[in-house]
Amino acid sequence: MSERQNLSMLDLLSTVSKSDLKGLGLGDVAYIRRHAMNGHRIFVLHAADGGALAMQNNEDSLRHDASFQELDLVTVH
């Protein structure tokens, strides 16, 4: 990408709202987080906007669910 294209991209990105960012990847990507519920460890599959899609006791089951729903799992730091 040229310097001019980089500046254009930065200008474009500076106009993107927080709600626009939340919608990016919605329906395409998801992530899994560990949570505690009633003293038990559970795993929750989250959509790109943070909404919970599914809960399981087993992370592998959620990976299967994500694959079945054609969602790409991403790592969240």
Image (cartoon, helix red, strand yellow):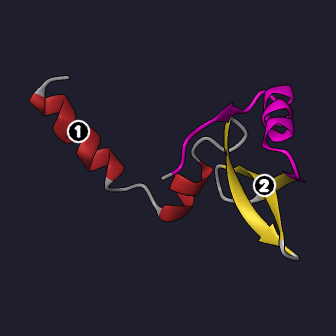
| Residue 21, percent from left and from top | 51, 54
- Residue at point 79%, 43% (across, down): 59
Residue 41 sits above or below residue 63 on the image: below
Q: Residue at x 87, y 37 (%)?
A: 61
Label 1 element class: helix
Q: Please name the residue that numbered disc 2 is placed on.
A: 44
Q: Nearer the viewer, residue 66 or 6?
A: 66
Total marks shown come to: 2
Q: Is residue 66 magenta?
A: yes
* 51 in relation to 5, above or below: below
46 is higher (above) or lower (below) than 17: above
Residue 23 in the figure: left or right of residue 66: left
Mark sitting on residue 64: none
Task: Identify the residue at image location x=36%, y=56%.
Answer: 15
Amino acid tagged 2:
Val
The CA distance from mark 1 to mark 2 is 38 Å
Number of residues whose C-alpha sits closer than 10 Å to that of mark 2, classed few (under 14), some (14–19) or many (20 or more): many
Quarter of image, res 51: bottom right
| Residue at the image point whose x is 17% and y is 40% from the top | 7
In magenta, the rendered stretch is 55-76
The x, y position of residue 43, in whole percent, is 78, 54
Pick the front one: 6 or 71: 71
Say which mark, if any, is on residue 8: 1
Tag 1: Cα neighbours inside 10 Å, few (<14), some, or many (≥20)? Answer: few
Kind of residue indicated by mark 1? Ser
Query: Which quarter shows the N terminus?
Result: top left
